[in-house]
Amino acid sequence: MCGIVGYTGARPAAPLLLEGLKRLEYRGYDSAGIALVEDGRIEVHKAPGRIAALERELGQNLPPGHTGIAHTRWATHGAPSTANAHPHTDCGGTLALIHNGIIENAGLLRTALIRRGHVFRSETDTEVLAHLIEEAHAKGGALVGAVAGALQQVEGTYGIAVVSTREPDTIVAARRGSPLLVAIGSGENFIASDASAVLAQTRSVVYLDDGEIAVVRPGDYRIVDLDTAEKEKAVSRVDWDLAKIERGGYAHFMLKEIMEQPESLRNTLRGRVLEEEGTSRLGGLNLSDEQLLQVNRIVFTACGTSWHSALIGEYMMEELARIPSEVEYASEFRYRNPIVDERTLVVGISQSGETADTLAALREAKRRGARTLGIVNVVGSTIAREVDGGIYLHAGPEIGVASTKAFTSQIVALALLTLTMGRVRALSILQGREVARALLRLPELVERILAKAADVERIAERVMRATNVLYLGRGYNFPVALEGALKLKEISYIHAEGYPAAEMKHGPIALIDDLMPVVFLAPRDAVYQKVVSNVEEVKARGGRVVAVVTEGDTGLARLADHQIEVPETLDLLTPVLTVLPLQLLAYYIAVRRGCDVDQPRNLAKSVTVE
Ligand code: AGP
């Protein structure tokens, strides 16, 4: 949720930390802070709001220091304020700490620490860690030992980094539940929540696992466990290029990522479609054909936009692979007593690969003997490392908080998985070939839609003053209605709801009036005629209709107030095309309403707390 970064080396730390923090701002942006160790003291600066506010507070002459840590926050405990911003220090100001996660037993620990004379300056759960480490460090020994001792008293999740005046060039970082990596430079090292913070400096990283602590100094680093026993860890290489995490001339990352979809889809498809065999090749599944055949039930689990793509995966799996499938909200699945066994395949879908609920749901499924798969975009993320097998989207970094290109790549990855599962069952080679060919045509069809973005912009002008919007679709496009509503809600703050079109008659139709735009997904698919009747019902009540239709379809021209055309494709793949106008509509409306499209209020890119 929050973004943390640390540096120790020969260069001035402040500019490197601020640059890293800006790249992490999509993780949380309600307050920020920095701590630098120099001349036996720690200088801390914090400010509410964006990192730009911290930069203003720091001024031109950045504080000195070659070792430091910095944090950008998404508040969980204690409202966004200077006092609650990180870093937090101990009573004597001899150590400073930043944290991403939630300390669940902070209340108890705080009471005990206050009784033992500690003075708290914030309302955060995090500050207890600073005082616990202070107590442990006062007993002597190295900082790493003090951190390990303190962590053994806390319940909850953390990605932390600590600096101390007693070891001025050392950063001690630890993880449980929140992502953290060590980035290795020459004569200097970094720690960070994810690689985007350090990509400009190095591509060599070590991903920490739960229960691991890193001791990082300019010339070396070591990884130990909570008993400070040494651990061997592999060094990975991050292959994203820097341009990928720049806006590249677009006004917003969201628009850039929408426009990147032809390329991101090509990357998701590359080397995975076996057209002649009518199937797909998914090297990372780690499942033999026998094991694929063993699967007698699929449970998809995810959150937010990823949950919407899971619904499409369920429809595909049942229609083409004939495998009983269901979709579970990860946050519900993890606390229910779910029925899964060794013949159940639990598929977790997550762009970031770090969403706490999805990670926990997969761990729960694994604990109950199910086989787990991850459909993930971020390479090396926790979900990717913990599942039995998986599919990387290769969609490239998604910086905009509102997920766009990851959604369309998730649908394509699910279609590829369906081909593999179907072709070892009843799916014929001809059916498989038809799907394979349609998949390979998608990127150019997407280009055709994005080339007409200006048409959507004109419709946005007409819809932007609405206070409520309804999205309706059937079959494969019901989840697209949900996704369209989510996009509009999360970046323009207009209340919107997605519904199966037929469900409208059972309640939402009461909302229809001439102020309420209704967006229909109406491609010429198997349920097209049913959707036309629903459009009639809305028009009969004076509703304003925006319809997404198949190119050349005039069936709705007389009914819809605005039409957006998309090319024809197979029913199961129409969501990849019909969602694009909805992404653009939400984007243009949000821009016109002056909203911060890339960093909408109250949201963050990956939800690493539950
Ligand atoms: C979507 O635009 C949102 N950012 C959010 O709903 C997101 O899809 C959800 O938090 C799941 O994230 P994940 O795919 O990284 O797990």
Image: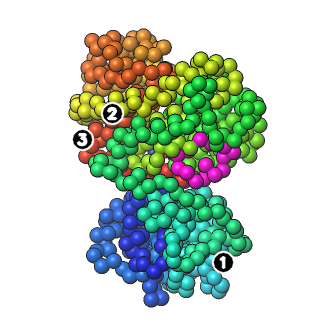
Find out whether the residues at labels 2 and 3 contact each other: C-beta distance under 8 Å: no
**Callout 1 secondary element:** helix
Q: Nearer the viewer, residue 380 or 583?
A: 380
Measured from the top left, where is residue 114 in percent x and y?
56, 75
In this picture, residue 53 sits left or right of residue 385: left
Measured from the top left, where is residue 144 in percent x and y?
63, 77
Measured from the top left, where is residue 285 in percent x and y?
66, 40
Query: Can see residue 409?
Result: yes
In this picture, residue 162 sits left or right of residue 424: left
- Residue flagged by tag 2: what amino acid is it? Leu
Q: Which mark is residue 485?
A: none
Residue named by callout 2 = 450
Query: Can see residue 314?
Result: no
Front position among marks 1 and 2: 2
- Lower sequence index among marks 3 and 1: 1
Taking the spot 34% from the left edge, 61% from the top edge, the residue there is 50
Q: Determine if the magenta segment contains residue 14.
A: no
Magenta region: which residues? 376-391
Front position among marks 2 and 3: 2
Residue named by callout 3 = 592
